[in-house]
Amino acid sequence: KKWFEWVDTRLIKILPPNIYRTVGESFQTFEYLTSISNFSAVQRESARYFGAGMMYFVSKKLKKKYNIDDEREALYEAVNSFIDAVGDKAFLGGNEPNLADIAVFGVLRSIENYDTFKDMITNSKVSPWYTRMTEKTGAPSRLTEASPVWG
C-alpha cells in the first residue's frame, strides 16, 4: 500500500518538471501528444506550440511548489528508492508484480518515448526491473485514432 500511494504522492509530482524541463523536451512531449489526437492540422500545431510553451513555464512553478532543486536527480532518487524496496526480488510483489509494480510501471511507460526516460534508465537502477515488467506486460497498445468514448 505504501508504494502504491507513493506513486501519487511522489512519483507523479516529479514527472512534469522532468518531461517539460527544457523547451525542447516540452516540444518533444507535445509532439507525441498531438500525434495521437484527432485534431485538425491547425489545432494540432496550435496545441503543440501553445501547450509546449505553457507547460514549460508551468513545470518551473511545479518545481518550486514541490521544492525540487534538480528535477532529474529527484527522479533518479525516487525510482532508486522504489528499486531499493524491491530489493533482491524480481518485483515488489515477489515473483509476480503487485499493484504497486503495475502502477509504477504504468507511470514510467507513459514517458518511454521521451528524453526523460532515456536519462532515467541510464542514471538510475530501474532498468532491470523495467525490463522484467515489460516482459510480463507485453508491448504497449493504444488506439491508432482517437475517438469519443460515447460513439
Image: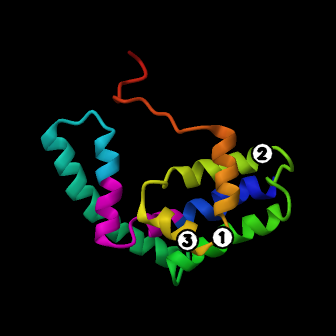
Image coords of residue 125 (percent x, y): 67, 69
**Which quadrant of the structure image shows residue 41?**
top left
Image coords of residue 117 (percent x, y): 50, 62
Which image quadrant: the C terminus?
top left
Image coords of residue 16 (percent x, y): 46, 63
Question: Does residue 14 appear left or right of residue 5 in this picture?
Answer: left
Q: Which residue is mark 3?
A: 122
Residue nearest the viewer, comparing 5 with 20: 20
Q: Which residue is mark 1?
A: 78
Residue nearest the viewer, comparing 107 with 51: 107
Image coords of residue 29 (percent x, y): 36, 56
Q: Judge the density around disc 3: few (<14), some (14-19), many (≥20) Cα neighbours within 10 Å.
A: few
Asked whether the residues under the numbered discs 2 and 3 touch, taking CB atoms below 8 Å apart as contact, a structural biologist would say: no
| Badge 2 element | loop
What residue is rendered at 55% in x and 68% in y?
120
Question: Does residue 100 appear left or right of residue 31 in this picture?
Answer: right
Q: Which mark is residue 97?
A: 2
What residue is rendered at 22% in x and 57% in y?
50
Taking the view exactly as shown, the residue that stands out farthest to the top is: 151
Question: Which amino acid does the dot numbered 2 rest on?
Answer: Pro
Q: Is residue 18 magenta?
A: yes
Q: Which residues are magenta?
A: 15-30
Q: Earlier in the sequence, mark 2 or mark 3?
A: 2
